[in-house]
Amino acid sequence: MAEMSTQSDREARTLAVRALEGEFSDLIALFRRRITENANRVSPGMLPGAYKVFTTIARHEPVTQSALAEMLAVDKGQLSRTVRELADLDLIERTPDPTDGRSSLLSATARGHERLADARGPQEGALLEALSDWRVEDIENLAHLLHALVAGSRPDGRSLS
C-alpha cells in the first residue's frame, strides 16, 4: 500500500510540475514581450539582449565587465560591443576600478536611470493593478517561493542537497 501511495504522490507531483512548467512558459512569453517593449522605450531599436545587460548593470552597479559576463553567461566579445553601445547612448558609464587598475566599473548614468524608470513605469503599474486584489502576504510568499526555486533551496531555507 505504501508503494502505491508513493507512486500516486510521484504522479501527482509530476502533474503539478508540468502545470507549473506551462505557467512558466506563458509567463516567459509575457516577459519577452514586456522586455522588448521596455527596450524600445529606453532607446528605439534597442535589442532585448542589450536591455538585459543594461538592467543587470543598473541592478548590480557598480559591476565589472567580467562579473557581468559571468552573471549573464554571455560571450565577452558580444558583451563588450553591447557595453560600448550602451555607453554611446549615455545609459551607462565606465569608471576606473580602484581595486584593479586594468578593469573598469560599469554603472548606469543619471540619464540611464531616468530612461529605465520611464520604460518600466507602464509594466510596474500593470503588475500593481494585476495584484491589487492579492493580499500582501500572498505577494510576499510568491516572491519567497520564486527566490527559493531560483536559488535551488527549499522554501523553508534549507539546502536541497
Image: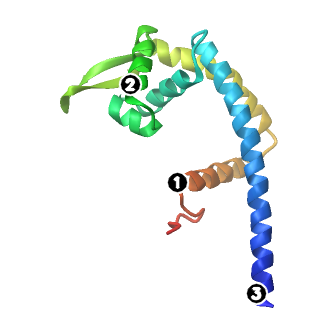
- Image location (x, y in percent) of residue 137: 70, 52
8 on left or right of 73: right
- Image location (x, y in percent) of residue 25: 73, 42
Q: Considering only order in the chain, which callout, 1 or 2, is on the residue closer to the N terminus?
A: 2
Q: Considering only order in the chain, which callout, 1 or 3, is on the residue closer to the N terminus?
A: 3
Q: Is residue 102 visible?
A: yes
Q: Are marks 2 and 3 in contact (CB under 8 Å)?
A: no
Q: Which mark is residue 3?
A: 3
Q: Which residue is mark 1?
A: 151
Residue at 70 percent across and 21 percent down: it is 122
Q: Which residue is mark 2?
A: 77
Disc 2 crowd, CA 10 A, few/some/many (<14, 14-19, 20+): few
145 on left or right of 23: left
Disc 1 crowd, CA 10 A, few/some/many (<14, 14-19, 20+): few
Q: Is residue 109 visible?
A: no
Q: Label 1's element?
A: helix
Residue at 49 percent across and 23 percent down: it is 54
- C-alpha span from label 3 to label 1: 31 Å
Residue at 58 percent across and 64 percent down: it is 154
- Amino acid type assigned to the residue bearing label 1 in the image: Ala
- Amino acid type assigned to the residue bearing label 3 in the image: Glu
Q: Label 3's element?
A: helix
Q: Nearer the viewer, residue 57 or 11?
A: 11
**The quarter of the displayed image where residue 156 is located:** bottom right
- Amino acid type assigned to the residue bearing label 2 in the image: Gly
